[in-house]
Structures are given as structure tokens and as C-alpha cells.
Amino acid sequence: MDWRLQVLKQSFLSRVPFGQSLRLLKRRVFGYKPDAANLRYTLQNLDQMKSELEEIDRPVRGTVLEIGTGWFPAIPIMLSIEGAEHVYMTDLNRHMDDITFQATLEFLKEDRADLLERLSHIHGPDDISATYLSPFDVSQVRDGSIDLILSRTVMEHVPPEDIVHLLSSLRPKLATGGLMVHLIDNSDHLEFSDKSVSRINFLKWSRRKHAFINFLIKGGENRLRHHEYPGIFEHAGFDVVKERAYVDKTTLDIVPSISLERPFSEMTATQVATLTSIFVLAPSAGTNVQQSVE
Ligand SMILES: C[S@@+](CC[C@H](N)C(=O)[O-])C[C@H]1O[C@@H](n2cnc3c(N)ncnc32)[C@H](O)[C@@H]1O
């Protein structure tokens, strides 16, 4: 679908009165089948985050809080069967329900034969040690009670000043030695449904056009590039313990031929074409940063 039509559709759907109830009714009547490729990619991203933590000898354990669980709780279910003591699933808006939970479970049972035995004990949200907090307010969680805070494809939807506010308000929630890990998709998400545009199409827009599109689409993107995040995390009181930047080769090749807006036109092609980021963060302590670019 042309990205402009996609913007109009999202703008309309986010403004329809009783939109949430209508969506629920639709799910009950027609079911809600997740995109299998998308969920497989989510699991791959979880593995990438876990690898980063394992490389610094910090396997996932204890109490975990996921920022922005979304519709399909694949990450919380996986964390729960892999040994997390408790998982807080959090969101700004209530997207997940029994129908999307069941759909995720069915996907995992079909796709992960290796986990079938452990998954067979789960029939609904009550069978995993998890709490859904939505709309999320940090005061719902006790100070010093969380061992790991993680997010996948959430930070790119949060304005920079709100990232500072969100992360700094979560900082006291971490237990001693607690960490955060965030996987960020820096690409233009409108390209998901319109393959005629590049993955950095939105970097051609003026600030005003970007602000207008974000006004139309609730939950638009901030367009931050990988190298801009560490300063924001620092403002929020976190050191980057480890970071990984995935440069998209196809995008890198086309950067010179695209007329980018400032400030993107003043960045290096690699900075612009880094489309996936993983950051492991610790409350500020001045630790060494291990940088990897792929
Ligand atoms: C693109 S979805 C990603 C969902 C899920 N993490 C995944 O990987 O499929 C972004 C999610 O982040 C949530 N979100 C955005 N800003 C948030 C915030 N400040 N606090 C908590 N959740 C937020 C949105 O409501 C949405 O569910």
C-alpha cells in the first residue's frame, strides 16, 4: 500500500470513536492471526539481545520488565519459559488481550517444536508468571525490584525528551546490578507496507513534514540515528555498557543518491544507514564501552 494511503488509514483508525472496542469486536469475530514472519523476527531480535547480555556474562534472569509489549507477547512468554522469575509486560495502550495471547501461543507451539513440552503447560496468561501493566505508570513497580528492563522496536516511537523522562523514571526500579537492553529499529516503518520507497525515505522530509505525519499517525517515529542515542541515555542517567550497530548494506549503497534533509545530509552514510541498534545500559558508573559495527 502506498505510504501516503497508509498514513491516512492509520490517522483515520486512530481517531474513530470507540476504535478500541471495534478492534476487539473484529478480533472476536474474525480472530487475529499474527504475521508469522514478524514473530519469527521478534524471536530473532530477542536472541540478539540475549547474546549481547551473555557476552558480558549477564544472562537473563530474575524479574524482567518489558517496555511496550504490544499486541503479541512472544518475548514475555519466551522469557518466562526460559527461566525469568517474573515478567512485567507494560504498554502505553492496552493492545494485548486473551485473543492475541492465544494467537501468540499457537504460533510458538507450531513454530518452536523444540519448546513444545514447556509450552504445553501454558493455556492462558495466568499460566506464566507475568503481570500486564497498561496503561503503564512507573509507580506500579517497586523500587529496586527489577533485574532487567528491555524493549524491542519501542524507543524509535518515543520523542527524545520522553525517552529521557521514561528511562530516568525507571532507573530507581532497577535492583543493584540491574541493566537495560533496547533493540531499536531506525528504519522508516512506512516502508514495511510500501516497498516502492527506501528504508530511509523519511529522512528526505523537512522537520515540518515529519511533525505533520507524526501528528497524523499516533506513535510515529523520532528519526534518531544510532549515534545520537548514547547522549540521550547519558541524560537519563545511564552508561552504554555495550552497543551494536547493524548497517544495512542496500541502504548504505543508495545514500549518496538520495537527497536527504538536514541534519541527515550532514551525517556519514554509515550513520544514516545504521538501521538496527542494540544498547545495553547500566545506571551511570563510567564503565568501558564495547563497540561493534556490522
Ligand atoms: C512497534 S510496537 C512494538 C511492540 C513489541 N515490542 C514488538 O516487538 O512487537 C511499539 C509498542 O511500544 C508501545 N509504546 C510506545 N511508547 C511507549 C512508552 N512511552 N511506554 C510504554 N510503551 C510504549 C506502543 O504502545 C506499542 O505497543
Image (spheres, grey):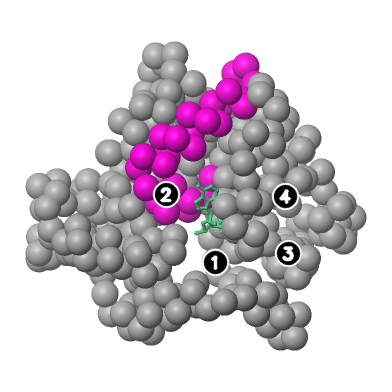
Q: Is mark 2 within 8 Å of ligand 1?
A: yes
User: Residue 216: x and y, percent?
Assistant: 37, 70
Residue depicted at x 34% and y 63%: 214
Label at residue 158: 2
| Mark nearer the viewer, 1 or 3 | 3
Q: Do the residues bearing badges 4 and 3 touch, measured as CB atoms within 8 Å?
A: no
Q: Do the residues bearing badges 2 and 1 touch, measured as CB atoms within 8 Å?
A: no
Residue 258, placed above or below residue 21: above
| Kind of element beneath mark 2 | loop
Label at residue 242: none
User: Residue 129: x and y, percent?
Assistant: 81, 43
Mark 4, residues whose alpha carbon is within 10 Å: few (<14), some, or many (≥20)?
some
Q: Is mark 1 within 8 Å of ligand 1?
A: yes
User: Residue 110: x and y, percent?
Assistant: 74, 69
Residue depicted at x 25% and y 53%: 273
Is residue 54 in view? no
User: Residue 202: x and y, percent?
Assistant: 25, 64
Residue 147, placed above or below residue 21: above
Q: Please give the range of residues in magenta.
A: 151-179
Residue type highlighted by circle 4: Tyr
Residue type highlighted by circle 3: Asp
Residue receiving disc 1: 38
In the image, 117 versus 264, the foreground residue is 264
Label at residue 97: 3
Residue receiving disc 4: 132
